[in-house]
Amino acid sequence: MTYTHEVAVLAEAALGEGPTWDADGQRLIWVDILGSRVHTYHPATGARGVRVVEQHVGAAKPRAGGGLVLNLRDGVGLVDPDGAFRWLHREAVPGRRGNDAAVAPDGSLWTGTMRYDEAPGGGTLSRVTGDGAVRTVLDDVAVSNGLGWSPDGRLMYYIDSPTRRVDVFDHDGDGTLTGRRTLARIEDSAGFPDGLTVDADGCVWVALWDGAAVRRYTPSGELDRVVELPVPRPTACAFGGPDLTDLYITTARTGLTAPLALSGSLLVVPGAGKGLPQPPFAG
């Protein structure tokens, strides 16, 4: 199958990340982590927006009732529908920042962290509920990245990028993880796994940092589709659009001595598949 990409937003994001479809607003939310910016894009009109925040921002997700939840350098913050900001959970750790995050089927926010120097064991994966309660789920992580759940919510997929693996856990309703095993291992020549999304067939789409591609793996771990891209550092992917059939892909410029023209832009592959509705944060 051949895929054709389009440019949704021509940009020069240092570290574009975390595309998320906001069904209520019919918009795509994404962040520039190192630029400390939360971007929005309405594909129906082409309208764009940006909110500058005071810290590096790893992820921004819709909240039930409006507003956003942000995975920031020093913890998790809330943006209310009127635009006001407040902290939900603040935990500043020198040399560490928030990275990718995702909302679980029960509405909890799963937040990843990493050290700026990417030291092994310096990051975590935690579950945050709407009342601000935090439970550390994994505490021996280097670069916490992609997160996603199977259509029935019984499996959770997870990436700690330097391992070059996409792992899968059994997941129960209260957020307990068991039975960690490897779904797929990325060969050295194909880059590092970064962000991921799960489609309606239960397949896992993985952006490959330094791999210039997004891959789709079946629930059994078979590689069955590859989307080749004109940039070396795609970072994450998510389905969006009214029918959740368009695959949006964030990209990065950071660390490139000669960034390509589209590095840092938001790309889209129309009609790439069928995504799952994403729940808002219940808080």
Image: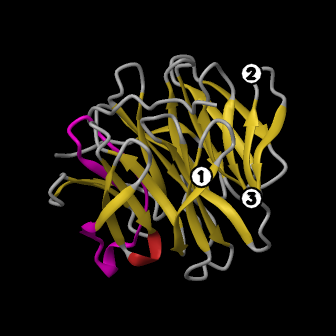
Q: Which residues are magenta?
A: 181-208
Name the image quarter holding residue 27.
top right
**What secondary structure is marked by label 2?**
loop
Which residue is depicted at the point 63% across and 36% down? Answer: 130
Task: Please name whichever residue, 159 or 281, is drawn nearer the observer in this view of the structure.
Answer: 281
Above-or-below relation of 262 to 167: above
Q: CA distance from mark 2 to mark 3?
A: 22 Å
Q: Amino acid at mark 3?
A: Arg
Residue 15 rendering spot, x and y as whole percentages: 62, 58
Which residue is depicted at the point 49% across and 22% down? Answer: 23
Q: Local crowd at mark 2 within 10 Å, few (<14), some, or many (≥20)?
A: few
- Residue at label 3? 73
Q: Local crowd at mark 3 within 10 Å, few (<14), some, or many (≥20)?
A: many
Which residue is depicted at the point 75% across and 32% down? Answer: 79
Q: Amino acid at mark 2?
A: Pro
Q: Mark 3 or mark 1: which is in front?
A: 3
Residue 184: within the magenta? yes
Q: Local crowd at mark 1 within 10 Å, few (<14), some, or many (≥20)?
A: many
Above-or-below relation of 22 to 253: above
Disc with the residue nearer the chain's start (2 vs 1):
1
Q: Amino acid at mark 1?
A: Gly
Q: Which mark is residue 16?
A: 1
Q: Which part of the image, by quadrant, shows the C terminus? A: top right
Disc with the residue nearer the chain's start (3 vs 1):
1
Q: Which mark is residue 81?
A: 2
Task: Please name whichever residue, 237 or 149, is drawn nearer the observer in this view of the structure.
Answer: 149
In the drawing, does residue 272 fall left or right of residue 118?
left
